[in-house]
Amino acid sequence: MPLVNNKVGDDCTVGTDKALADGKALVDSLIKVVACYRHLASCVGSCTDSLQLRDELRQTREKAQNLAVSICRHLTSHLRDKSLPEEQRREMELLWVAFSSSLELLHVDMCKVFSMGDIFSLANSASLVQTGLQGGGSEVAARALSLPDLNQAQAPEAGLESQERSTMEQEISQIDHMIDDMEMKVNVLRWMVEPHGPQYADPLSSTDSASLALLSVDEEQPGHQPQSQHSHMVVFVVLFAVVLVATTLSVCVVFFS
């Protein structure tokens, strides 16, 4: 009877599960940082635009790029492994799709910030759009970067705007090159990857649940008519009566004149 080394199989499974958990943690962190960058990017050119905001964008962008490099190396090495179990491969492909989508969003927002920074210069504060928004960006960026206070983490320099313009174009091209390189190294068809599990489900809010409950009550009571339908019927009857009276008066005027 052949002997089976179960310990080797168990160690391989544990190692794969740990790699999957590490990948999920990295992708979740990237999604939060990209969402933070999108929030900050929406403030460029508004009345909240400042050197501090540009510095927060730079720090958030650097954090996202560092995470992207780590995730790309981590997922590429495992997805190119032919011995990866099928279940773990599907989970890795889900992470790959989430990662590539987040990276494309980051690339779009970086291009947006680059273009908006060219239109709205901080040297001319009068050209900024008065949106009425105040503050809020530093706290969001500090949470995304895991810093207690972003204002104390690094003070913005006076020449930050010109430095940002000189480095952003290079960073945008690096992200673009990374996206192309990912598609060449790993062939994951996005339309073939199906989300599953509670993490990717679309939970119903309390409002949606109440709406579904009302719809189910209406379906159970076919004779019941909503109040809005009654209102429409009353308006229709009144309009019909007005038209009828107007027609009658016109006929009377024609015959008796």
Image: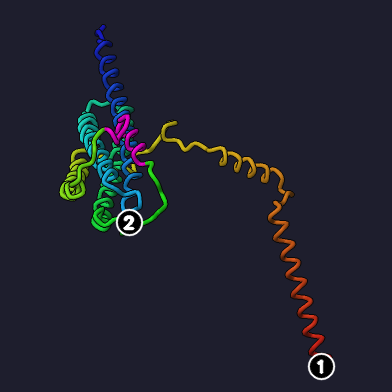
Amino acid under disc 2 = Leu
Pointer 1 residue: 257
Crowdedness near tag 1: few (<14), some (14–19) or many (≥20) residues, C-alpha within 10 Å: few
Task: Pinpoint residue 112: horizontal percent, then vertical percent.
Answer: 28, 52
Task: Pinpoint residue 5: horizontal percent, then vertical percent.
Answer: 25, 10
Quarter occupied by the N terminus: top left
Quick check: is 119 in the magenta stretch? no
As rendered, which of 207 and 93 lies closer to the eye? 207
Q: Residue at the location (22% across, 38% down)?
A: 62
Quick check: is 141 in the magenta stretch? yes
Amino acid under disc 1 = Ser
Task: Pinpoint residue 98: horizontal percent, then vertical percent.
Answer: 32, 38
As rendered, which of 216 and 107 lies closer to the eye? 107
Task: Please indicate whether residue 143 sits to the left or right of residue 206 in the image.
Answer: left
Pointer 2 residue: 128
Q: Residue at the location (26% across, 15% down)?
A: 11
- Location of residue 8 (image quadrant): top left
